[in-house]
Amino acid sequence: MRFPYSKQGHLRFVTPLLVSLFLALHQLQHTLASPLYLDAVLSLDLEELAPAFDFIVVGGGTAGLAVASRLATNLSSTVLVIEAGSNQEDNPGVFTPGLAGSTIGSPIDWSFNTVPQTQANGRVINYPRGKGLGGSSLINFQAYTRGCAAEYAAWASLGGSGWDWNSLKVYFKKSGKLHPPTGNSQNEHVDYDSTANGASGPIDQSFPPYMAEQLAGWHQAVLSLSIPIAKDQGNGKNVGVSYIASTIDPSVHRRRTSVGYLEDNAIQPNLVVLTNAHVTRINWSPLKVYGNVVASGVTFVGGDGLPINVTASREVILSAGSVQTPQLLELSGVGDPAILTPLGIPVVVNLPGVGANMQDHPMAINIYRLKPGIDSLDNLLNDPIFLATSLAEYAVGEGILTDFVYPVAFLSSSQFLSTADQQTTFNLLSASNNPWLSSKQLAATAGLLTGGSPIIEFVPANAFFGDGSRNGSSYISLAAAVQHSLSRGTIHISSTNPFNPPNINPKYLQSPADQFLLAKAGQWNRQLAALAPLAQYIDTEVVPGPLVQSQADWEAWVKATVSTEFHAIGTASMLPRADKGVVDNCLKVYGTTNVRVVDVSVVPLHLSSHMQAIAYAIAERAADLIL
Ligand SMILES: Cc1cc2nc3c(=O)[nH]c(=O)nc-3n(C[C@H](O)[C@H](O)[C@H](O)COP(=O)(O)OP(=O)(O)OC[C@H]3O[C@@H](n4cnc5c(N)ncnc54)[C@H](O)[C@@H]3O)c2cc1C
Ligand SMILES: *[C@@H]1O[C@H](CO)[C@@H](O)[C@H](O)[C@H]1NC(C)=O
Ligand SMILES: *[C@@H]1O[C@H](CO)[C@@H](O)[C@H](O)[C@H]1NC(C)=O
Ligand SMILES: *[C@@H]1O[C@H](CO)[C@@H](O)[C@H](O)[C@H]1NC(C)=O
């Protein structure tokens, strides 16, 4: 037997007896101080727990826990969350901000891989996704950004009425709580916009008390190029260079994950959170309503390997993320007949957009060795004394382990490219050749780029961020990621076995503009590293190194190195059904009466942002739409 979730000193055993008491407890709702946490290792029959739940949320990830917690504010309805992983709040790799990245490849990462990328030398690229309560908010880099207002206008114009910036602003604010900079020597120069940020939501945003001097130097170097400051990455005007907030609770210097939603709502006895339970399919009622299919519930497999059915009397909400939401739809017969029929899966809803329109932010990274004596996170591995000192500092809320990402820059094409290179980029945009890229999406993207929305993100990391060749030195990694790629990938099942990962095919560099832009970005990063405010910390460029000089060299390097900024979207796009959409603007899956998608797979066109703030905003708006 496992110990269930413990919090605020209440260590609660979950036993079959407690399970059978659930309904009674529900009536005594005010006597319980938190949701009920169950672990499927106990192989419970949930039918004993409750005959049916009003809502079943599949995936206790970033958006999943947020929407479930908000739905459970209606104490007359019951909500079940089913999460494949376990509770990780006590995992130091999760809660220690400076250890972000250390859990990639660990048991709390699904550790997916792409299929070989034909435009990128046939390479297979790691594709991490978080597994456990919190989902990818467990393993991400805590960066808090939202993108720019014009991008949400583009989303709304493609069929997402109600998803424009002004409509979403209230949901961004509802999910968050910004802690202003404390004014200490490390963050006195950090700015923010109080009107843009929430004051009492569950997801803390704060400015860490430590900033590496070379990251401050990076910020100065960008400013020396006459790039303007973007005051706050949360106010819809994101073009420029910023110090950004991180999803860190400053009172304890710990990462804040979506589990924060459960902790913030002390009384939710009508919410049951089941862990170590893998959903394998949606079940359908034999009856249709006006030709639409009705979900009756889901099947999951717990620790003992046996399938268990659980009934949803109102809705099934898919929050399994951009990789596994399309997988579950296809396993349940919702998708493209060309994918389903060869696998022998009966087509329940013919919806060719499922798993298509996948977009990511393709990324390439220059790496520089730092001068001796300049510390980076690498030194935690290099030097046991540095590690011991850093742990001691962290214990009192100071030092290198309190931080991960600080400055970033989102640049428009005119800030980043010469006039000639802008022209080349626009020519390549129109030349891109992808059957899944609609003319509406092409026009919307071109409009964003000519209108001055960011085309590229630059973000420095205080560590070696690459494969192999790191040694006992310290490094700074200068990452660049294309924000509005015209490549359109797919995520489809290749088997009826729900435990086989789907084929992830981002089709990196399908759009020739991406290769051109990442090659230019590598050159921009090299120039930046030579500017005095940053150069004073740098010893040598180790990636790509001095052999890479011409644009052709850089493009070859991009093919050899492109990877993911971890921002997959679009695999259940909010678009009209006629435009190969999967969900309508109420997040309802076409052809169903009661299945919604609530995660970032609904975003139909990419944004110049990291994705967690958007996942929370989608969840907040979803709960409002449903309640
Ligand atoms: C390594 C990495 C770094 C990132 N860095 C940042 C960053 O710094 N800032 C930022 O804003 N964004 C970042 N992102 C992106 C951001 O974290 C994600 O886009 C966002 O968290 C996705 O939220 P989601 O709700 O769509 O999915 P997820 O949070 O991934 O949730 C999906 C959940 O569903 C569960 N699940 C899946 N299938 C099943 C099943 N069959 N049965 C039961 N449960 C299932 C999963 O275990 C998971 O808990 C990063 C992502 C990664 C992977
Ligand atoms: C679960 O539901 C499915 C689909 O309705 C059905 O085929 C299966 O027999 C059920 N399994 C159990 C264990 O009740
Ligand atoms: C490893 O470190 C030494 C200096 O200590 C340096 O000469 C060598 O080039 C380094 N290699 C890399 C990849 O940084
Ligand atoms: C609250 O839940 C009950 C039971 O599902 C439902 O009948 C009622 O309409 C809900 N109220 C709101 C405001 O959604």
Image (spheres, helix red, strand yellow):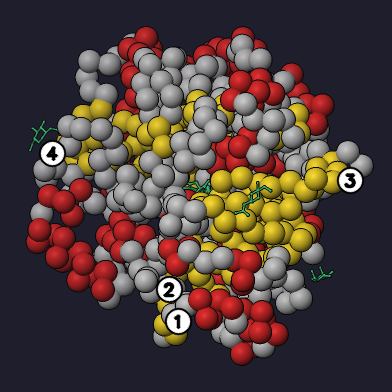
Of label 2 and label 1, which has the lower sequence position?
2
* Residue 356 seen: no
Determine which of the numbered discs, if any, sits on residue 12 in the image: 1
Of label 3 and label 2, which has the lower sequence position?
2
Q: Which residue is identified by label 3?
A: 289
Percent across and percent down for residue 398 are: 29, 69
Viewer-proximal residue among 43 and 503: 43
The CA distance from mark 2 to mark 1 is 6 Å
Between marks 3 and 1 in the image, the one whose residue lies nearer the viewer: 3
Of label 4 and label 1, which has the lower sequence position?
1
Percent across and percent down for residue 244 are: 48, 54
Q: Which residue is identified by label 2?
A: 4
Percent across and percent down for residue 546 are: 22, 19
Residue 114: quarter of image: top left
Residue at 26% from the left image edge and 64% from the top image edge: 399
Query: Which amino acid, mark 3?
Result: Val
**Most distant residue in the right direction:** 290
Q: Is residue 146 left or right of residue 253?
A: right
For label 1, the crowd category at 10 Å Cα-Cα, with few meaning under 14, some 14 to 19 and many 20 or more, is few
Q: Which residue is identified by label 4?
A: 471
Viewer-proximal residue among 336 and 473: 336
Residue 21: quarter of image: bottom right
For the N terminus, the image quarter is bottom left
Between marks 4 and 2 in the image, the one whose residue lies nearer the viewer: 2
CB of mark 4 within 8 Å of CB of mark 2?
A: no
Q: Is residue 215 left or right of residue 359?
A: left
CB of mark 2 within 8 Å of CB of mark 1?
A: yes
